[in-house]
Amino acid sequence: MTDVATESARLARARAWFASRGRATFDFQEEVWRACWRGESGLLNAGTGTGKTMAAWLGPVLESGEGQGGGLQVLWITPLRALARDLEKALQEPLQALGCGWRVEQRTGDTSSSRRARQRAKPPQALITTPESLSVLLSYADSCTQFQRVHTVIVDEWHEFLGSKRGVQLELALARLRGIAMAQGHGLRIWGLSATLPDLPQALQTLLGPGREGLLVRAPQPKRYEIDSILPPALDRFPWSGHLGLQLLPQVIERIEQSRSTLLFTNTRSQAELWYQAIVNARMDWLTTTAIHHGSIDAKIRRKVEDGIKEGWLRCVVCTSSLDLGVDFPPVDQVLQIGSPKSVSRLLQRAGRSGHAPGEISRITVVPTHAWELVECAAARHAADAMDLEPRTGLTLALDVLAQHLVTLATGEGFEAEELLAEVRGTHAFAALSDPQWSWVMDFITRGGNALQGYPEFRRVALSNGLYRIAGDDLARRHRRAIGTITSDASISVKFLSGGMLG
């Protein structure tokens, strides 16, 4: 809690910093800062490019000079490692001007082993990471020491986690961090950020867990979007199936030519590769100003592409969801979507890559790949205009994720079964976990369950001196390399038995 004079002084510093950049603070940003200083958790719902990042970040930053000391204090959870580098720069920007001496670093799958070792030896005050990397950190024997001073966790793009096993994995990790904070005698503030969530109270409850209250903050000014489609010159010649859409390549080339910079989104990596090759083959003079970006590309190449977008020398970048979220690219003035975006939320998220600033209009053009997608694109546009977004409900009782989490904690400091059961039941995902289900998971990690009990390598965890611990160093190393959740495609292909594609 803060007194009125301290709060006023902090707000004055924040307003002065915004004014130095030719901007003013928004009421919703100041509301989040005040709530943060009161020790509250919550969920911020604001459009893409409206200032969510600073709303979540400046709360802990403005109180950083008031005796909080060193060590890791703030965790920023991002869904994509491609966002971490851009976020690191954004979070560092206000620190010096606001008199904050914090170090901000990132730890993802792209981070070198030497830098990870340095971070564990001398942790930064703020760390940007993913759920998987956070779980890896929880698997070390000194995890309680590493996280003992963490007082704030910010979950960026909460809608990307909600309704997925990655979201369940994150819920369990947040419960562990909350338990560490309680053991140290202080609370843990958790803030979620999202631009595209329909049921905000449910999303907030899933983030914080059952029985925990939090503040729901909405930005009053909705983001404005403009959505249109490229139509084929002759509908009777447009195919009824397929997923490439290369029939409209000439129209796409024309759109790219008319704009300074374009992000061309595809739904799969193979589709991105084919479209990149088609554009380069059609316009060889664009070879040095056209690039491709997806998760399988080397990190150094991805960083070069991201820099090219920001610096404005790339005309077009063909990409997948690796550039969907949270990256601020002011030079981009056009977004194209190849094929159906598969959801209204994703359509708006990708549209937000253009006009990524408060008050600006975000525009996106959909390129249908076959005739049925003309109808689908029109339906998505009408739903987006009405902000009729798909519901997202948190998964429950994902026992495979729970089993992995238990092995993760056993790999670290170990756990006491009854104590951890209470912690696990404090999450939305496992609030209804029954005793028989808990016993099944414990049996699976210690004995391999009924199916795998004959294989010694599945006896991962053993009871020792009242704590469940990993059964060997080799198992620990193998487990850390395999941390993650099994994901599924959002769509499937439907074919006739004769082999023809239905859709």
Image (cartoon, grey):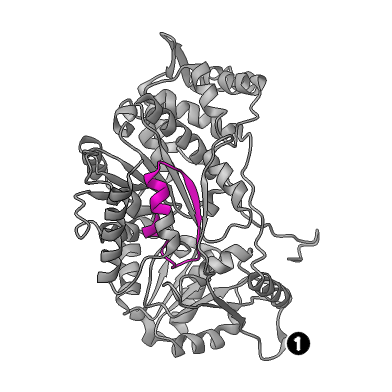
For image coordinates 36% across by 35% down, the residue present is: 137
Q: Considering the numbered disc 1 on the image, is that residue within a helix, a strand or a loop?
A: helix
| Residue 375 among magenta residues | no
For image coordinates 43% across by 72% down, the residue present is: 358
* Neighbours of disc 1 within 10 Å: few (<14), some (14-19), many (20+): few
Q: Mark 1 points at which residue?
A: 236
- Residue 111 in view: no
- Residue 459 in view: yes
Q: Is 52 rendered above or below residue 126?
A: below
For image coordinates 42% across by 48% down, the residue present is: 35
* Residue 195: x %, y % from top left: 52, 61
Give the camera-side residue of 372 and 51: 51
* Residue 431: x %, y % from top left: 61, 31
| Residue 37 among magenta residues | yes
For the N terminus, the quadrant is top left
Left or right of residue 304: residue 254: right
* Residue 412: x %, y % from top left: 37, 25
Give the camera-side residue of 13 and 372: 13
Identify the magenta region: 32-55
Q: In the figure, residue 151 lies in which quadrant?
A: top left
